[in-house]
């Protein structure tokens, strides 16, 4: 069993989907935002989350993650309010953007990091469509102000890369990094 350093219900659902055995603890950290190096920023944020929880729970493997949506050099995290969600959606509608997720495993005093990148093309939307989508409440709490696994699925024209990355956790990359770190994501005796 490992610890997920995140409050994200989407990350928890993705890990449950693959049979991972974990508990979730939300770390209190100050995340950084770096418009010039968004990949470095998401990896750093994932690592500080994992480090914080690992310091509080020594002897446990800890997974941290951080996701950002990047379009035209601008990095979007989660919108603070409906107005910011509308601005984010206005920036990505009709364009291609990149979803970056930094991942970090901290275990036995060692740190392992990586990042996943997925390219998404969002359909053109009118301001009325954006307002209606924001009114559903779905954009809140999601990087880039949309949920590809929810209502926003109808706005996705193309996707290149990991679907689970866009949801919030690139499962293949997480599992590959766990193997490198020597972390078992599921209990060995669960096959019975």
Image (spheres, grey):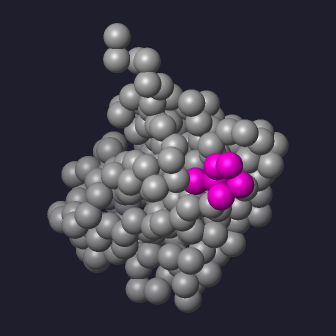
Instruction: Give the camera-side residue of 8 and 21.
Output: 21
Horizontally, is 127 left or right of 41 in the view? left
Tell me the quadrant of the picture where the C terminus can be found: top left
Q: Position of residue 129 (x, y in %)?
A: 32, 58
Instruction: Give the camera-side residue of 28 and 58.
Output: 58
Over which residues does the magenta segment extend? 105-110
Reply above or below: 66 against 90.
above
The reply to whether the magenta stretch includes residue 108 is yes
Tell me the quadrant of the picture where the N terminus can be found: top right
Quarter of the image where one finds residue 13:
top left
Q: Position of residue 84 (x, y in %)?
A: 56, 65
Q: Position of residue 83 (x, y in %)?
A: 56, 63
Q: Residue at x 18, y 63 (%)?
A: 157
Horizontally, is 100 left or right of 44 in the view? left
The reply to whether the magenta stretch includes residue 137 is no
Report the residue that reaches farthest toward the top.
192
Q: Position of residue 90 (x, y in %)?
A: 40, 72
Q: Residue at x 38, y 54 (%)?
A: 176
Work out whether residue 160 can be spotted. yes
Quarter of the image where one finds residue 100:
bottom left
Q: What is the chief secondary structure element of the magenta stretch? A: strand
């Amino acid at each position: 069993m490992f610890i997920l350093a995140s409050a994200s219900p989407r990350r928890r659902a993705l890990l449950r989907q693959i049979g991972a055995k974990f508990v979730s603890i939300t770390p209190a950290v100050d995340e950084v935002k770096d418009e010039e190096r968004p990949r470095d920023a998401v990896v750093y944020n994932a690592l500080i989350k994992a480090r914080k929880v690992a310091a509080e729970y020594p002897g446990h493997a800890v997974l941290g993650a951080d996701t950002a949506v990047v379009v035209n050099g601008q990095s979007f995290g989660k919108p603070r309010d409906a107005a910011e969600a509308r601005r984010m959606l206005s920036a990505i509608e009709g364009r291609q953007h990149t979803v970056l997720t930094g991942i970090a495993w901290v275990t036995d005093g060692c740190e392992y990091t990586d990042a996943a990148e997925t390219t998404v093309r969002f359909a053109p939307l009118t301001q009325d469509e954006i307002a209606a989508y924001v009114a559903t409440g779905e954009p809140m709490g999601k990087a880039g102000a949309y949920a590809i696994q929810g209502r926003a699925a109808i706005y996705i024209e193309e996707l290149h890369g990991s679907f689970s990355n866009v949801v919030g956790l690139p499962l293949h990359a997480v599992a590959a990094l766990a193997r490198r770190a020597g972390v078992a994501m599921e209990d060995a005796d669960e096959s019975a």
